[in-house]
Amino acid sequence: MDSLTVIRPRAEEVEGQPILRPLPSAKCRSVGPFVFFDHMLQTHYWPGQGMNIRQHPHIGLSTLTYLFEGQLQHKDSLGSDQLVNPGEVSWMTAGAAIAHIERTPCALRAQGSTLHGLQVWLASPKKDEQGPGLYSHHTADSLPVSDRSGVQIRLIAGTGFGLISPVPVLSPTLYAEVHMQTATTLLIPTEHAEQALYVLEGDVLLDDQAIEPHCLVLLPSAKEVTLFAESDCHLVLIGGAALDGPRRMNWNFVASNPALIDQARARWTAGDWPTVPGENGRIELP
């Protein structure tokens, strides 16, 4: 096998929550529609503490939050107010302008909690960049699962491995959570043009090459590869069709036309933006 492209994430902190961010990077700006990938590291919050991402804007993308532990409250300028639990999907399409917050709910903040999960951003196709906003919540039991021969695949969004997720993605997408027992194998087909692997935990071989946990590994295009679990493993696969042209990303804004970002920055600064009901605090433009 040719040398793999491995993206080692940078460590950051978002409103008190430690994260690893492999995407975007200098080596890779996108994988299919995925332009942003945050691993919210397993973090214990003592009573009185929690994550609190105040009101902030988005354009031109969809956010997808998926938890392994803990609970978050999502609120947005459409009027959505949803508690998100492990194994559930919180999906928000920004369109031309949306604002939202994500925080540890009050009950958990009072008693203390543990948070661990992923948030990704998917760039909208050009035809949908300035469309309407949308929010949907998908329970864990609504996501399709394949569970055989020691390998469990839960399709978070898109299509793959013979499964179809109910999440309303806007372009061909693969987003799958995979659990592999020790000494099991998984063939990754070439059904998506661009694909990448992120190992959350465990020792994995990709066609006999060891994969370092907490790194995003770009898979070769148009070539099937095989994963072998040297220990119990937990990983995710992302991918899909290539974007319909380059994207510009600036702060929380994604667009194919830089003028849309300039307009969004000016509107947020001026306070000309949809607001989240009941929320006064906001994150100012950096």
Image (cartoon, helix red, strand yellow):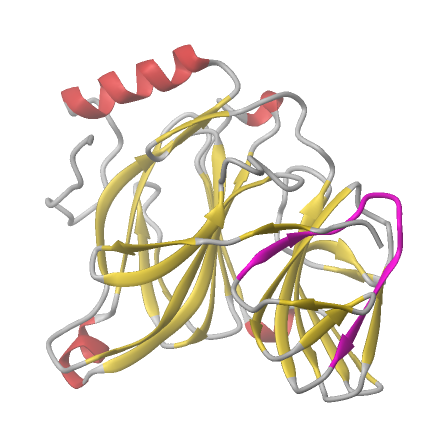
* Residue 284 x %, y %: 16, 34
Q: Is residue 192 visible?
A: yes
Residue 33 placement: quadrant: top right
Camera-side residue of 16 and 127: 16
* Residue 169 x %, y %: 63, 44
Residue drawn at x 54%, y 69% as measured from the top left: 139
Q: Is residue 156 visible?
A: no
Residue extending farthest front: 3
| Quadrant occupied by the N terminus | bottom right
Residue drawn at x 20%, y 78% as measured from the top left: 107
Placement of 88 over or under 45, stated as above or below = above
In the image, 56: left or right of 210? Answer: left
Residue drawn at x 83%, y 77% as measured from the top left: 185
The count of marks equals 0
Residue 29 placement: quadrant: top right
Q: Is residue 154 magenta?
A: no
In the image, 125: left or right of 61? Answer: right
Camera-side residue of 214 and 54: 214
Q: Which residues are magenta?
A: 215-229
Residue extending farthest top: 259
Placement of 210 over or under 283, stated as above or below = below
Camera-side residue of 40 and 255: 40
Residue 166 placement: quadrant: bottom right
Residue drawn at x 89%, y 56% as measured from the top left: 224
In the image, 193: left or right of 72? Answer: right
* Residue 149 x %, y %: 84, 86
| Quadrant occupied by the C terminus | top left
Placement of 132 over or under 110, stated as above or below = above
Placement of 149 over or under 221, stated as above or below = below
* Residue 119 x %, y %: 45, 55
